[in-house]
Image (spheres, rainbow, N blue to C red):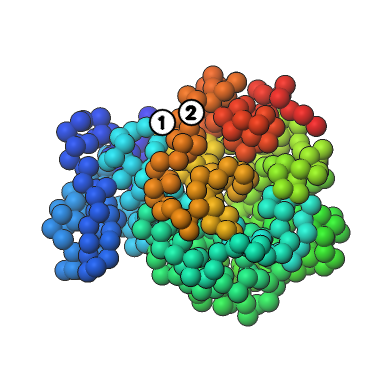
Amino acid sequence: MTRNGRSGVTSAISGIRLLLRNPLFRLAIKPLSKEICINGEKRKVAYEALRLIVEDTSETCLVARFYAKMLEILFNAAIKYFNGNKDEVYEALKDPSIRRGLALVLEGLATYGITIPQRLPAPFLIVWNFTNMCNLRCKHCYQNASSRLINELSLKEKLNVVNQLDEAGVAALAFSGGEPTIHPHFLPVLRKAVESGMYTALATNGLKLADRNYAKLLKKTGLRYVEVSIDSADPDKHDSFRGLKGAWRKAIQGVKNAVELGFSTAIATTVTKMNLDEALDIIDLAEELGVERVIFFNFIPVGRGKDIAELDLTPEEREELLRKLYLENKHRKVQVFSTAPQFARVSLEMSGGKDVAPTHFYVRGDPIVAALAEYIGGCGAGRIYAAIEPNGDLTPCVFIPNIVVGNLKEEKFSTLWKNASVFKALRDRNRLEGNCKHCPYKYVCGGCRARALSYTGNILGPDPGCINNAEYFKT
């Protein structure tokens, strides 16, 4: 394996993984997962140690100081060994959300050792279907959103959910829906999440963002990432699919406002037979608008999507699309991703093993990230990601709303995350069934568990979106 020009953060993690081959080192880092109290605030040793590397403060404990010094020495050695960028690591650690994410990796390694895929004490990402309210009626809506449900969480209960996620160490919180921007609780809950240090994201139809003053307010509050749904480069097709005349125009204005205000901005497109031939046009549109990335979402026949299941791509159509997206990403200014976990397999196959897309993110030519992909990659449901419904139900994925592991009004998030039987099953790729179980790419892909459930009735079943499972595809 070449060691030229590694990412600093990747180098640091790779160094820790190498050292974990020594059982004495694993024993030595176990305290990283322990909880300590700093000025009445509960923190994990791993997070506090990472903070101390970049922040000089006397308000801490000796244990955290010891591990801060140890990690600093280890990081510097690993960065040197892998020819990484030291400045990049120290700059990244100034961001609380990056510290949270790296702390989760360290705690996972300290608690569970190296597992395939890597087990974590909390998810990197929570997607919160904040409300069932929506100002559109999209044909493919997984939430079947329309009006507010009578059992949606109160503001006090929502703020308590943020506290639970914060205490668990969740790195990122994405607000989805329904449409969160039209709910009166969105801003105070967003503010609370920002104050906790979590990375905050918004998945939106873009209508409210067309109001520049509202977009400015979100920026001022601390929102960092905006993902606007655009289903077609053709305004009429988008409006028809979304159920509102003029929706495309407002969504595009929302994207423009987000880009101009400095949000990390993406376009999200759910691919069906309706817009399959527009992939390149949508990428062109994304480049024209100046967004950072365009994400092509798997269509999942749940919610209202069940009524248009005939628009789902065949396995062959999906394979051709993923190969096209891989090639486009090689030369486009905008980053091109797919949420289909098979994108990781396609990337590996087409690059001769050099390029990989762990957890739906494409990495160009980095063999160390390629080596890590089997530890962090593939479908993240119940593994590095989970979803919260408007009433507080915790589920493995927004596209799996009917498998509820518990409700956050009644049970602690951290307890459910660690103990729910369905989460444990999803973390063990050896429990997959059909071709997914025997596939050589199961650790970097694993198939979409939501599609498996929708088509086979079994969350561990084969994903019919893959060409290797074409016999399970039903139209």
How many numbered marks does the figure carry? 2
Please name whichever residue, 274 or 194, is drawn nearer the observer in this view of the structure: 194
- In this view, the residue in front, 109 or 260, is 109
Give amino acid for label 1: Ile
365 vs 334: above or below: above
Q: Residues within 10 Å of mark 2 (few under 14, many from 20)?
A: some
Pinpoint residue 182: horizontal percent, then vertical percent.
Answer: 66, 71
Q: Residue extending furthest left? A: 62
Three-letter amino acid code at disc 2? Arg
In the rendered view, does 399 fall on the left or right side of 141?
left
Task: Please determine whether, in this image, residue 263 is positioned above or below residue 299.
Answer: below
Q: Is residue 271 in view? A: no
| Quarter of the image where the N terminus is located | top left
Residue at x 68% of width, y 69% of height:
254
Which numbered circle lies on residue 429? Answer: 2
For mark 1, give the secondary structure.
loop
Which quadrant of the view contains residue 337?
top right
Tags 1 and 2 in contact by the CB under 8 Å rule?
A: yes
Sequence-wise, which precedes: disc 1 or disc 2? 1
Q: Any mark on residue 116, and which?
A: 1
Residue 384 visible (yes or no): yes
User: Which of the labelled discs sits on residue 345, or is there none?
Assistant: none
**Gap in angstroms between the C-alphas marked 1 and 2:** 8 Å
Please say if 302 is above or below 226.
above
Badge nearest the viewer, 1 or 2: 2
**How far from the left and from the top, in percent, is residue 58?**
16, 68
Where does residue 273 sit, x and y in percent of width and height? 81, 41
| Residue found at x 22% / y 69% | 39
Q: Provide the secondary structure element on which disc 2 rests.
A: helix
